[in-house]
Amino acid sequence: MLSKNQLGFLYMFMSVCAFSIMDLIVKWSENYPVGEVLFFRGFCGIIPLIFLIPKEKYLVFYKTNRGFLHLKRCVAGLIAIVAIFIALRKLPLATVVSISFAAPIFTTILSIFLLSEKVGLYRWLAVIVGFIGIIIISEPGFSSMNLYYIYPIIFCLGLSYVAIAIKQLSSSEPVWLISFYFSVSIMIVSFFTIPQGWILPSLKDLFLLCLLGILGGLANLWLTQSYKFSDVSLVTPLKYLALVFAIIFGYIFWSEVPTSKTLFGSALVIISSIVIFRREIYHNKQVSIQRHEQ
């Protein structure tokens, strides 16, 4: 029988694996319109949630008194997921994952304005170090006017607001309901892209696209379970395994080799997010969401 901390580690590891495979499939799906891929993420992402709805709430599970906050969370999440999907298709896998680690940096800044948080010297220094890391990673893109480097940053901004919205919603809403509204919103928005020309997938591609959605739903649930069973400070460092997976997958499938600038910038971003995270633990505040809600 596994201890609670061991269960937490196991769930975090499964979550990181699921997100990494999901990123891999998103990058592979570049021949399919983004809207079509979003449909599978939303529709199939609902499947794992169905099993979490309490039986006594089957007929009223969708009811909420915080509809407007759900709406804002879904809009921010949609912006984030579209941005990361585009980034994954246009940039090296390790580069996108590296910049995505900067989400806690933007969350720290937004929390000042949206939650009236007081940010001390250590977290401000961490924010500055993180921004330097982002500049180092994306400098080659900016110098050659590769604007696709903007998309991972947009993802971080969107995810930062998602983190704050989920913190507010979690006081009264179950996790499965928050995820349900997000998945439904993705599916609905995807329908508006049908006129752009969806492609009928082969059976193999259909399986992979469905797997993408299911993994996205499971990854978020496993992430939540990890934090439920174990101390957040113990399991969070495991999320940086995503960069290792990104480097391996990028090399195997697309012959991508991270540059020394990417690795150095990634190290600064990771150090920055760890410092921010540790300071939040010290002050008994857990605002940062750890990848992805995607």
Image (tube, rainbow, N blue to C red):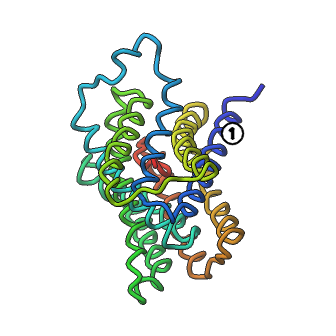
Could one spot residue 63 in this view of the protein? Answer: yes
Helix, strand or loop at label 1? It is: helix
Q: Residues within 10 Å of mark 1 (few under 14, many from 20)?
A: some
Please name the residue shown 48% across and 51% down the image.
292
Please name the residue shown 43% across and 43% down the image.
42
Q: Amino acid at mark 1?
A: Leu
Count of all numbered marks drawn on residues in the image: 1
Q: Is residue 229 above or below residue 267?
A: above
Among all residues in the image, which is located at the extreme top?
Answer: 56
Looking at this view, is 246 or 12 the one in front?
246
Quarter holding the N terminus is: top right
Task: State the residue position of label 1.
Answer: 10
Please name the residue shown 43% across and 53% down the image.
36
Q: Is residue 278 above or below residue 180?
A: below
Could one spot residue 119 in this view of the protein? Answer: no
Q: Is residue 9 left or right of residue 142?
A: right
Residue 110 in which image quadrant? bottom left
Q: Is residue 23 left or right of residue 142?
A: right
| Residue 83, image x, y percentages | 39, 62
Residue 5 in which image quadrant? top right
| Residue 254, image x, y percentages | 65, 72
